[in-house]
Image (cartoon, coloured by chain):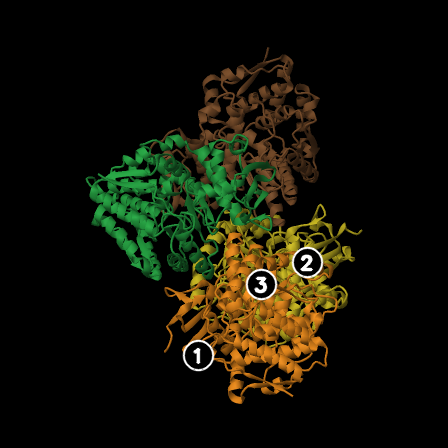
Chain colours: A orange, B green, C brown, D yellow
Amino acid sequence: MPSEVIDYSVLSPVGSLDILSINEINQLSGLNKGKLYEMFRRCSLAVMNSGIDNDDIEQLENQYLDFEISIVPQARGACIAVQNAPARAFVDGKMIQGVKENLFSVLRDIIHLSSQLDLDLLHEEGNGPLITEAVFHTLRQANALQARVDPNIIVCWGGHSISEHEYDYTKEVGYQLGLRGFDICTGCGPGAMKGPMKGANVAHVKQRIRNPRYIGLTEPGIIAAESPNPIVNELIILPDIEKRLEAFVRLGHGIVVFPGGAGTAEEILYLLGVLMGNKHGAEIPVYFTAPKESEAYFRQIDEFIGDTLGPEAQKLYEIIIDDPEKVAVELKARMTEVKEHRKARKDAYYFNWMLDIAAVFQEPFIPTHASMSELNLNTGQEPHMLASQLRRAMSGIVAGNVKEQGIAEIHKHGPFKLHGETNLMKKLDTLLTSFVQQKRMKLPGSKYVPCYQVVTD
Amino acid sequence: MPSEVIDYSVLSPVGSLDILSINEINQLSGLNKGKLYEMFRRCSLAVMNSGIDNDDIEQLENQYLDFEISIVPQARGACIAVQNAPARAFVDGKMIQGVKENLFSVLRDIIHLSSQLDLDLLHEEGNGPLITEAVFHTLRQANALQARVDPNIIVCWGGHSISEHEYDYTKEVGYQLGLRGFDICTGCGPGAMKGPMKGANVAHVKQRIRNPRYIGLTEPGIIAAESPNPIVNELIILPDIEKRLEAFVRLGHGIVVFPGGAGTAEEILYLLGVLMGNKHGAEIPVYFTAPKESEAYFRQIDEFIGDTLGPEAQKLYEIIIDDPEKVAVELKARMTEVKEHRKARKDAYYFNWMLDIAAVFQEPFIPTHASMSELNLNTGQEPHMLASQLRRAMSGIVAGNVKEQGIAEIHKHGPFKLHGETNLMKKLDTLLTSFVQQKRMKLPGSKYVPCYQVVTD
Amino acid sequence: MPSEVIDYSVLSPVGSLDILSINEINQLSGLNKGKLYEMFRRCSLAVMNSGIDNDDIEQLENQYLDFEISIVPQARGACIAVQNAPARAFVDGKMIQGVKENLFSVLRDIIHLSSQLDLDLLHEEGNGPLITEAVFHTLRQANALQARVDPNIIVCWGGHSISEHEYDYTKEVGYQLGLRGFDICTGCGPGAMKGPMKGANVAHVKQRIRNPRYIGLTEPGIIAAESPNPIVNELIILPDIEKRLEAFVRLGHGIVVFPGGAGTAEEILYLLGVLMGNKHGAEIPVYFTAPKESEAYFRQIDEFIGDTLGPEAQKLYEIIIDDPEKVAVELKARMTEVKEHRKARKDAYYFNWMLDIAAVFQEPFIPTHASMSELNLNTGQEPHMLASQLRRAMSGIVAGNVKEQGIAEIHKHGPFKLHGETNLMKKLDTLLTSFVQQKRMKLPGSKYVPCYQVVTD
Amino acid sequence: MPSEVIDYSVLSPVGSLDILSINEINQLSGLNKGKLYEMFRRCSLAVMNSGIDNDDIEQLENQYLDFEISIVPQARGACIAVQNAPARAFVDGKMIQGVKENLFSVLRDIIHLSSQLDLDLLHEEGNGPLITEAVFHTLRQANALQARVDPNIIVCWGGHSISEHEYDYTKEVGYQLGLRGFDICTGCGPGAMKGPMKGANVAHVKQRIRNPRYIGLTEPGIIAAESPNPIVNELIILPDIEKRLEAFVRLGHGIVVFPGGAGTAEEILYLLGVLMGNKHGAEIPVYFTAPKESEAYFRQIDEFIGDTLGPEAQKLYEIIIDDPEKVAVELKARMTEVKEHRKARKDAYYFNWMLDIAAVFQEPFIPTHASMSELNLNTGQEPHMLASQLRRAMSGIVAGNVKEQGIAEIHKHGPFKLHGETNLMKKLDTLLTSFVQQKRMKLPGSKYVPCYQVVTD
């Protein structure tokens, strides 16, 4: 059954993005429907489905097969025209302003992708500094880097599919953060990516904070499954998951992790791997936090980290159970140190240049049956290297769960196979199985069929 | 048990209010603790208890007997100092910005009351035009009158003590209003005065409305029992209930009524009485709305109106059950008519000068056992005159329920006695009894003892 | 020959002034052309002649006998309609925005005069505190009092009729003040009241100061002869010359005096008289400055002050010849002391409450042949009292020169007669005669006939 | 004698430019003093000499041989440090804000030049569309392209060395343009490039235009000789003269030409050449205007155009003598047509995409003795081609007069030699000789030695 749809033309909102060159417009014009246009179309559709809780992208795509989008040059500025667009993006036939702004953010980032970066180059190995420059340029282009502002961006990670009491808890943490003036940055989407923003918004209203920031960092592969929630007022599309992760850790000043599934595990492993690589300390406060009922979740994660990456990794975060105010108060206190640390190293507050990120965390990992089976999942390597391999394993599982490309691979060849040291693999299996049992892999509504298989040697 | 308290000094937020004359500061200085200072102290305490759901003002007062407030002249602007203030108004020892702003709104209105108006004069009879000027000046002083803005303020009335599904419904209506860009004006306080603002706020965020207005109109007698909810960003204290009611109908462009108790009934009777007095129409769209479960409530109200004020009164509003979107869509459509009506009469959009309000609705009614028993509750008079008498009856009951002065009267002399025509009195009794049974008179937590007695002749 | 005229209606510019009550509109409506309307009409005409160099008000009035002005209530805000208005206030038939804004400033102050102050009361003796409150309220109403801003308003006094090299010098001083971020406050009008603003404007552009203030303080009696120059962006009409002088000294943080005639002498005598009355110091930096060619002017003034008010008075100012940069650099340096002084006394930066102004300087002086001849022009009194008498003498001469009422008196009864001690009178006569010879009494174009006569006993 | 100099560090003003990547900072760091650094240093020095009237760049350079500039990364944003900088850029040791902002504009454009454009590519032939894109990107980067604004940018051309009455006339025209709300765009520098901005500024103050635009378009070769006057609040450095000329005609909505020398002649020839190439009309209103005393100047130009490019070229402009108001009124009227023309062709108001500019006008012309002598100065070609050749001749003469590279060439090899048809060469010689005689070639102060020689075959 086709969903209700609407045709519409919308002038760009005030901002510098509305000034497009003829070249840029041609690149995205519907006429030559290339790869870039497809990416633009898919991301735009996700934005127009903003707020929907549905990570079954195939089903979503099928609902809007006739959706089309084009850019129309106008004497007074750029104009985006949509056809057969989701009706939920409109009120009384007028596009919701937040949707409109995010649509033009998509346009900005896709154009930026196309004109400013040589994508293939960036995908090659050994391009560390270039990749960091690319992340920097994408964020700057989006006006996400603000000079003369003290550190106050808290990155919140956690699952898109979480229980109601966990969701309420993320709201409460967001509220306490908002009361202290923090801005929130998440990965877009529902669950733990939406709750902190909602909570912070209530507090920001009380504190009369006129320009609160709700930054959503996403990438073309995930945006469809985790459409930006309606509060996101700075939507930024990074080229791939690795740059998105780098954007999180260079843009944020503190990190809060809520319970989640494979994606959250990927984020944790990335973060710990990167931090372990910074021998002289990175001064990024990290808190794992959950309501009382979910305490066991982080105990299990903590144990897994201790077992695999060792006690040094465990020192890099603190676990706070059932105390939203404490999370916020501690982060507030830690901001002074963050500031001093940056100042001492003459680093910017708005972009953590000094953080070392090893190549293995920057290079794009394309999960295929081959690349997944080749992961080095053994303890006989430096902890941060093991973290990088485990991170990739999790990344592949996320792809198999909700990304178009990954799902297609699974359809064709069956589940990914993960090989490695028996003991390690058992722990991994236990962890993943618990994610499945706790329904953290996919939004409820269907039975979850694992896209992976842990093979013990 | 004393509540947690805090001492604090706060510079006025940016705005014109921070410039006080020596005279103005002296008037409110704690040294000569006159009536004005008491009013300032009481209103300030209510603001600092913002968001609390407690209409038992005696209990609230007792918690903060040591609360003190004073104005300290400073080279760089006015400064308010509080001692033993409720800790809930602070985060990590810093006053919440919204509380701070509302505190200075109190200061502004109390000073305005004292210096600009001759209160006693206004309380005399036969001062219609003067009273309207006074309402106008109070609103202008508060920057609540905005030229060059199309009609878009929706007044939402309803009970402070409502059921959870009713509360959720007021939020949903607020959300639909907010999506259409409406600003919200209520009487401050919890329940139906808070829900529409909360709902609208979510929608305003989606619509990226940068300066949404959440106007709270209150008066010194009621503010303690119905402390401003934290979303209110324009707090205005009118001198008394009659001016507050006049402010509602001259400032608002449309009115939504949710279920409520005696206060809501007072508002309905005032509104219908005033509208019936405008023979040539007043073009104020009025909607009574409730969720499915509360449909009976408005059927009963409607019947009472039909029985007492007649079918002409019933034509002045529309009842919409369980359809928040319809309420908002209809109001949006009606705004065009409101605009045309004002234009045609060369009336301002920001203040409904042309609305006739009979003296009997403007003159302050002080509920005492004498004045309550003298009310003319008989059908042998013009419907709008009967409305005025019934309005006063309801006003007295509200005072007896939650206002300091009223409660004191009841303590001393027992319940107010209402006399009148048997048939009418029976209907009134039925209505009031249902309010009691539905727990609409007082917030839950204690058994409600009626402050009135309906006496049939 | 009638000048070119235009009919026009103009909506109020954005601001709070556009919200008028029905009462306020009625007061100024053209229908009941009372005294207030006449004042409004005359001030408005002056504003519309903004920038014209003509102090012959009779001639000016005759050119625009048919000029009319009225307020038209409009649904979307107040509207001022003019008929037969000076064409110079328009470009291609559209009113110049600066004229428009100043027109609404006139409206604001006239309404303020009428509704907020009891004029007669203020004109009575013994009302010191009340008069200060009135000055304060007028300035606050005009948003001229800005909290949270460091002292930076320089008052510039000097003649409306000065030589070209003196005019260029005032521009250069204004330029140096502007480079250092100072705002300028003068008495409106041409000559030394315009030059500093013009110079400062060039510097403000270079310094990218977005909201420079060019404050013009005037009063109904003088505005016609000294119409606001076009740069004035804060026009404020005080009720009379005494309140205007008080506004200067309470609003400004430093004072620069350029050469001038009787008006400038009045200002100097007022200032010195007031400062001498502040035994504990007032921390108001005062500089008399002139180009090389006009050095003799200030030497003569200085001598006159020494002879009449004594050496204590001479310590209250510094004379700087031909060094605009030094004037600005010294004022900048002195601002630190001004700030400390205010801070130490807990006085506001935006209004010098602590400055003592004796009643004799606050009470309105109406120059008539009787009051002028009764002035106590003898040395046998305290210097600040003698200053007050000399100030009144000068005030009378200004009135006789350019104010409507004063000119009428002179027409009827001949020149004012000034009596006093022979020696003092000779010095006074010498000073005044030099003003006449230097053409400082009236703008060039006609032969100046003195409106006064110095009578030595 | 060394000039007074100052060392200083300045944080970037608020704006997006202050966010630099490590890469960008490295490129401009003083350590590797490459060509780009030299360009940055030279342009910065010009900005710091803002307002100076001196086109002898050699002398200017020699005064500040020790001037150095570097970029210092700071935690809170980028910082520029200067050593031995011209004292005139400072007030009391603090850098003038306008200088500061223009300094960061230089930084922006130099970085843009280096990172965004492949300079060599653009300098190759046959890159028309690429060149237009480059101009577009430079202007967009500088926020000079504003959507949703009606056409209102007037380009003013004319000599840097003009007589006083001509200068006053340019001010008066600027004043009349400013009164009508026009923004002004010139080539930076003194004379006819400064006067219109000064005049417009006075009018903009009167009209309370809060964000007037004074756009200065320059290029690295000319900026030293024609340092930006202090009013320029949008300084943009295009890569070369051809892109600068293209920026003028695509950004402006109307063009006013005042008397000038070779540079002005270059601009006129470029403009007419381009317009003649647009067969279907380009709707760019062009006015040549001068005071009465300079009427002969434009008669001579007009005659030269008639003789060389023919009567069609003469139809492309209108000559208005001694009537500043008429110039402004006509331009105002013509803006409606400009708007309609753009609308009809769906072209942007902020950038004239549809204007055809032939390759011969876009390709960079490097004046050398060889390239100058090879110019095809004969009538046997299409008028717009002849215009292109004459334009290049004038361009070479400007280079020889005031550009570093050109002057060096002349020093080495003597004057450029221009060959061509006898009749044409005579007319050219007459024109150039009159420029010399009228002192339009160089600022007064030294005897002008021609850098060219007209050789008749």
> Gap in Å between the C-alphas at discs 3 and 2?
21 Å
> Does A225 sit left or right of A347 as displayed?
left
The percent coordinates of residue B119 (x first, y second) are: 40, 32
Q: Name which residue type carries label 3.
A: Asn
Chain letter belonging to callout 1: A
What residue does disc 3 label? A143
Q: Comparing marks 3 and 2, which lies closer to the viewer?
A: 2
What residue does disc 2 label? A339
Local secondary structure at mark 3: loop
Q: Comparing marks 1 and 3, which lies closer to the viewer?
A: 1
> Gap in Å between the C-alphas at discs 1 and 3?
34 Å
Chain letter belonging to callout 2: A
Local secondary structure at mark 2: helix
Chain letter belonging to callout 3: A
The vertical placement of D442 against A163, above or below, is above
The vertical placement of A350 against C438, above or below, is below
Are labels 1 and 3 assigned to the same chain?
Answer: yes
What residue does disc 1 label? A59
Residue C391 visible in image = yes
Q: Name which residue type carries label 2.
A: Lys
